[in-house]
Image (tube, rainbow, N blue to C red):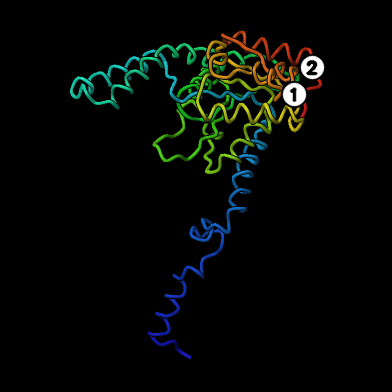
Amino acid sequence: MKQTQEMREQVLKLRRAKAYRKAYTDPDFLSSDEMRPVRLQLELQKPEMALAAHDVKATVVVFGSARIWDKGQSEDRSAEISKLLKKDPKNPLLVNKLASARRLEASAKFYEVARDFGRLVSLADVLPDRKLVVVTGGGPGIMEAANRGAYEAGAKTIGLNITLDMEQGPNPYVSPEFCFRFHYFAIRKMHFVMRARALVAFPGGFGTMDELFEVLTLVQTGKKRRLPIILVGRKYWDDVVNFANMAKWGYIAKEDLKLFRYAETGAEILEHITEFYRKNPQANGKK
């Protein structure tokens, strides 16, 4: 029986209906609250498959502030805010921004330390069976510096970027095949830790503290095999976090203070990591 024009139009309408979409091609369905468990699994699996395909099993994770730029960028930032302030000298927001920018100029040295470390660790043979691959959050600041150092050494480097309300994206030194984008902080942090053989924390804010204390907790509780944890810039860490007082109050054990070391240069960071695996070769495991 021949279809009438009305029936043909009805069939076309049905083909355009949301319900007719294949489930895995339906963005409204995949973005629903009920499908969050599936999205979590997808975010876990996609980078896992990509890294496994390239046999990436050992990484060195570098955390630190996105606000720490190199010397030239830091000076330019202060100069730009100064120009704006001259036009509006009583603007309290600009006054605070300039003060913060000038304080951050002193932190530009950490950019160069992270860059140097990224280069050194990418060239070094820390583990007997494989190279350590530099992994960062993939953004600007310290993340860019570490990725940049690895890139300049000719090594592949990983960026685990996160979607945020403020405009940001991956830095240009991340290897394209290892440039991942996440929605969920929890899954992103899992990927930081899963292959980590060392953690290097530069000065930073809430995000850096979140990532550092998660790894410290995992190691302290035995959920993660012991690994070298290096805090860069002791003056900053001693001023911001009083670990000794945590032990004094009894909220951590004195032995927990041995879970991390301090360093000031890229070479010193690398030496701490190399020494750890020289003394603890069994620590190069999967846990």
Seen at 64% across and 35% down, the residue is 51
Q: How many marks?
A: 2
Q: Does dot 2 land on a helix, a strand or a loop?
A: loop
Q: Are marks 2 and 1 in contact (CB under 8 Å)?
A: yes
Task: Judge the density around disc 1: few (<14), some (14-19), many (≥20) Cα neighbours within 10 Å.
Answer: many
Q: Does dot 1 land on a helix, a strand or a loop?
A: loop
Task: Judge the density around disc 2: few (<14), some (14-19), many (≥20) Cα neighbours within 10 Å.
Answer: few
| Residue in the foreground of this view, choosing between 36 and 59 | 36
| Residue in the foreground of this view, choosing between 136 and 228 | 228
Residue under label 1, please give it. Answer: 226
3D distance between C-alphas at marks 2 and 1: 9 Å
Name the outermost residue toward the right: 282
Residue type at numbered disc 1 = Arg
Seen at 66% across and 37% down, the residue is 53
Name the outermost residue toward the bottom: 1
Residue under label 2, please give it. Answer: 280
From the top left corner, tell me how far across and down residue 10 is, in percent: 42, 80
The quarter of the picture where residue 130 lies is top right
